[in-house]
Image (tube, rainbow, N blue to C red):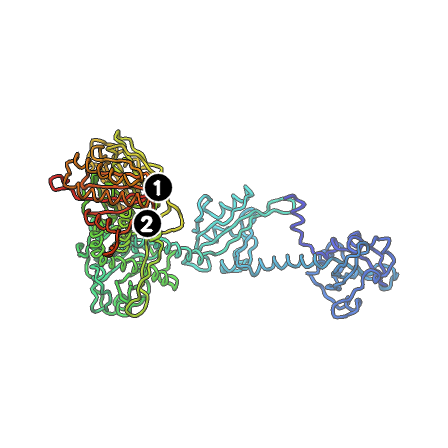
Amino acid sequence: MSAANTAESADFRGPLDITRAATVVLDADSTVIGWSPSAAELLGYEPAEALGRPLSAFLSVHPLGGTPPAAAAEASGVSEASGVSGASASTGIGPPSLVGNEIHVAHARDGRELLVATATCPLPGGAAGRDPGAPDRILVAAEMGELRHWESRLALLQGLATQSPVGLAIYDTDLRLTWCNTAYEREIGQPLAAFRGMRADELYGGGSFVTPGYPQTLDGVMHQVLDTGEPVLDLNFRAQQPSDPGRDHLWSCAYYRLEDAHGHVFGVCEDAFDVTDRYRVQERLALLVEAGRRIGTVLDVATTAEEIAEVAVPDFAATVRVDVTRAAMTGETAAVGSAADMSLLRVAGRSEPGTATPDPGLPDPEGPESPRGVSGAANSTGEDRHPYPPVTYPPGSPQHRSLSSGGLVLDEGTLVVPLRAGGGILGLVTFDRGVGPDASGRPPAPDRATTFDNGEVALADELAARAAVCIDNARRYTRERTASLALQRQLLPHHLPPQSAVRTAYRYLPADDVTGVGGDWFDVIPLSGTRVGLVVGDVVGHGLQAAATMGRLRTSVRAFAQLDMAPDELLTRLDDLVGQPAEEPPDAYGGAVETYDVTTGATCLYAVYDPVSRRCVMARAGHLPPAIVDPDGGVSFPDLPAGPPLGLGGLPFEAMEFELPVGSLLALFTDGLVEARDHDIGHGLDTLGRVLGDRSASLEELCDRAVSELVPGGTSADDTALLLVRTRELDAERVAHWELSAEAVSVGRARELATGQLEAWGLEELVFATQLVVSELVTNAVRYAGGPLGLRLIRDRTLVCEVADTGHTSPHLRHSAEDDEGGRGLFIVAQLVQRWGTRYTPTGKTIWTEQALPPADGG
């Protein structure tokens, strides 16, 4: 900023000051005998046009209250706010005699209307007894808007000096106090005269800056501002307020250098605002945020109790003790009781170092017998494995009163808060401030009060409420665990039946290895034509609801798979099913039954492998792609279109087809296998690929290695499922295929081909039934569909007969009346075979049947 601009911004002379205003010199007859350039600029008249003319030709002065100008001049007093007082000192002219006139005038040249403020100042001696034409008084005028702007600046300075809540102080270049406002005087507790000339560090001894990177004394900061000229803003300073000894306060301070109109430095200005209350509110909010992050990390009563103690000490209390009921520890449903019938156990406690009277019975939080180290097993199984000491409180104690009333009890430096849930009491949390000195004789920390105020009582209640919810959840978890485990065991396959298409091995590790309950699942589904369906899925969450949802999805996948749906179509149907809201029947009282749907966000991968063509078609709904290991040990993760997770609805799924050489390894897994807190998913996939690349290991060995390296200790933050599949091929000797035309003669040709092939396989016992099956299926294809036709026989664990055509209408099994001439063929076929069905292909459909092999040739 230039010196000129600085002078202009620091000029507090009023607009009616004689050195700035439009000035008119009048004689005793109010004739203009002097006309300043400012008057010419304001009113538009040049001096030659104004001199010698009466003032009324330019201005018509009407003073406030209707008093004539002369009388008003005699009666008016001195007004320092008029803006003319400065003229008295510089010109010798007396004080203004008329202030506050407002006149509407028109500019002589451009005609614009002006609102002008005027004031008159009599000259010493006046014109009495002298020439009437001699100067008698001076009239000054300025635009009213400029005067109002100047008055607002004066009001601002007055407000900063007397009414502002911000403490303002000016220190000279020797850093001694020269001026301060009223707020600063209140902070010191004395008038300015009592401490003028003192240094800031003398006024606030022992204080320090909280904000790092600055000198740790007030003198040092102000020296820095004087030397560099750079202001310092939002600097937090902690010290004891002189007017409030014994308690620390926190100020937000700003410092900037003061210069005169010529750029000469004459001091430093300090702005200081007491933010103690706001800072304490922020501390409480931060403590609540920390409590939300750290309390309830696991479903464990003692761990949750230890977490609330860790959060509260030492920022909130010197000592925290947590006692819970025995019912909460063992997982019993009943948690309601009174002081007489509730048995409390001391499960957690923490004290800041040097506390004078450590609580007896508090386990050492760092020792091997701490609750954090052993309570997981005790609480998760409902067995009291750790000898938590029982606690009994005498009548009249704050804890006994809290148990009896079920409410908060505040007793000087002790605050007892009950852990309430479900209408009952789960325990107590006792917060102690440590009123007396600690073991070293030191007094309590000065920035923490020895008693709890209303805000801190509310904060303690909130902390206890959060802990109570977590403890109650852990208690409910114990009760839910048994039912969840039973359900899980019924839903997951206990063993996978042998398949001609693949060899399999699997591992399933729930996130909670104690309960064994999770939301991941896998399955191997036999399909028509010796094909096999492979599925792996992941449901968000754990426990009973996740297991129930997993069972719902697994059952749906198996049902859709039996309809021979393509993978992308199956996922579309499954997504539609998940997106449909479940309509629950009303309960016994006519109200709706509350349900929880956690299906949204579930993922799934479905693949179909055909051992005849060695083709694999797969699609996924938000799930990780599989790992494919070729016979040479090369590992790849195919770029399979991801698809949306189940339940979002309206988005398509895409399938991809691969050819897998015989002996290829296909690994389907959930994210719990490759994701962990200590490494990202890329590292997990690399490790899995390295393990699977060992061609000399069996499938069982590969499963064990993958789990041991990716899930150390067998525990993971998420459920883990791994399904390994080694592909096989049905050689040409076990598969026969022919193409036929859609003509009637093809029926006989099909019987001949099938009979010859069965005889070559040594299955003469199946010739008669197979001829009937082939005749019926080919006849229907010729009659109701189009050609070409395909006939295929597969000798596997069963005899598979397939007839393919270009039609898209599936035959239906029906009962024919006695007088019907047809319609019995498919019914006869159904009686001759074990299973039959239809699957659709891009070119039409295939009708298939399965017949049991003779005992001698079974397997």
Frontmost residue, 814 versus 417:
814
Query: Whole-percent x and y of residue 75?
Result: 75, 68
Q: Which mark is residue 842?
A: 1
Please count the marks in the image.
2
In the rendered image, is residue 225 in sight?
Answer: yes
Query: Quadrant where the N terminus lies?
Result: top right
Find numbered disc 2 in the image and state the secondary structure of the residue it sits on.
loop
In the rendered image, is residue 535 in sight?
Answer: no
Find numbered disc 1 in the image and state the secondary structure of the residue it sits on.
loop
Tell me which numbered mark, 1 or 2, is placed earlier along the sequence: 2
* Residue in view at x 87 percent, y 58 percent: 52
Q: Disc 1 marks which amino acid?
A: Pro
Residue bearing the label numbered 2: 602
Frontmost residue, 726 versus 210:
726
Q: How far separated are the C-alphas under marks 1 and 2?
A: 29 Å
Task: Specify whether 139 is left or right of 767.
Answer: right
As drawn, 794 above or below 261: above
As drawn, 600 above or below 406: above
Frontmost residue, 657 versus 789:
789
